Image (cartoon, helix red, strand yellow):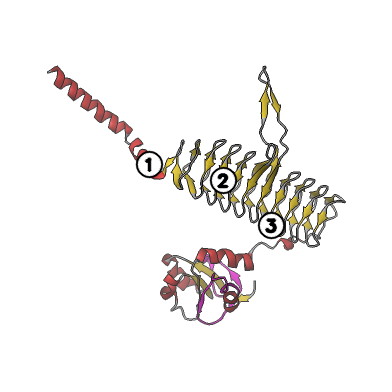
Amino acid sequence: MKTTAAEILSAFAPQGIVKEMVGPDQPVQRIAPIEDCGPGDLVFVDKPKFVALVTQRRPAVVVTSFKLKDLLADGGDRTLLLAPNVNLAQALIKQRYAGRQFEAAGWPQIHPSAVVHETAMLAATAVVEPRAVIGRNVRLGERTRIMAGAVVEHDAQVGSDTVVHPNAVIGYGCVVGNEAVIGAGSVIGSEGYGFAQDQQGRSHPIPQTGNVVLGDRVRLGANCCIDRAAYRTTRIGAGTKLDNLCHIAHNVEIGEDCLLTSMFCVAGSTTIGNRVIASGQSGVSDHVKICDDVVLLHRAGVVADIDQPGAYAALPVQPLKEYMRNTAVFRMLAELRQRLLALERRDGGSAAG
């Protein structure tokens, strides 16, 4: 990368991401980790403990907070870019100057080994990599990239600036919004898990004929499975991010800007609100409703509606403070049992006397 501190300020000041530059304008050769930075580098510093390391390694530009300004401002030729939210600045600056360059793979726009149905409508700037398959009536938006081995089945739609990573599958009739990321091996529109049993206990599949709709800026990690609805739509709202190995069952509706980490699993026909956060291996039962602004922790298992925002943990879930108190008591159960037995012996002895 080649840029300067002043160019970064100019690019990000209008949005308020970077608000002030302290020191001379300097060229930036790369964005580096603090532990491995040096002259010509740009680093992000949001904690006082890194100040000594920055002083020692002497990067050219430091993106930091207003609180750390005085600790870092006496660095000689060091330039500071002051940001209200250093982590957000890191995300946006690194996206612009040091994100993955998909063009580096060197494939032609439509690889000769790709299979593209004659009725598919691809934007002029869409890219289809080797051995990808684009089905009948598929629509791909501007600058969208279908990577090697991925499949977009018939009548599916993919918006603009979306990346579908290798070997992912977008099932027939499903819709993916703009600026989405579909992780390698993920399946959108897999068959929902619906069966009917006869008198002998044999299971007969109920055809799952709905679809999946992903909003703008949705991100799926690797090997996620999103089941299509039985009749209507399984829906994931704009801005929601799923980690690797998540499963969303049929008819589920998930709101906007949720953060759902690895092995999150939700059963059918559940509704999850906006800005819900789930830590690893959390699970939600079927036909449950979770309101906005809920945080699920410690392998939370949700088996009933949650209608109050807040943090919840355990199985079945409890408010976090209650869970922590109960956990503290649980660790003392053996001691409490011994004390109870001693009291019973004493009281029994007193009664006998």
Seen at 80% across and 45% down, the residue is 154
The image quadrant where one finds the N terminus is bottom right
Which residue is disc 3 drawn over?
A: 178
- What kind of residue is marked 2? Ser
Q: Name the quadrant containing residue 50.
A: bottom left
The span from disc 3 to disc 2 (Cα, nearest Å) is 23 Å
The image quadrant where one finds the C terminus is top left
Indicate which disc residue 262 carries.
2
Mark 3 burial class by Cα count in 10 Å: few <14, some 14-19, many 20+: many
Above or below, 16 against 190 in this view is: below
- Report helix, strand or loop for mark 3: loop
Asked if residue 157 is among those painted magenta in the image, a careful observer would answer no
Seen at 51% across and 76% down, the residue is 20
Indicate which disc residue 11 carries.
none
Q: Nearer the viewer, residue 82 or 130?
A: 82
* 2 or 1: tag closer to the N-terminus: 2
Magenta span: 11-39
Which residue is disc 1 drawn over?
A: 322
- What kind of residue is marked 1? Glu
Q: Position of residue 239 (x, y in %)?
A: 60, 55
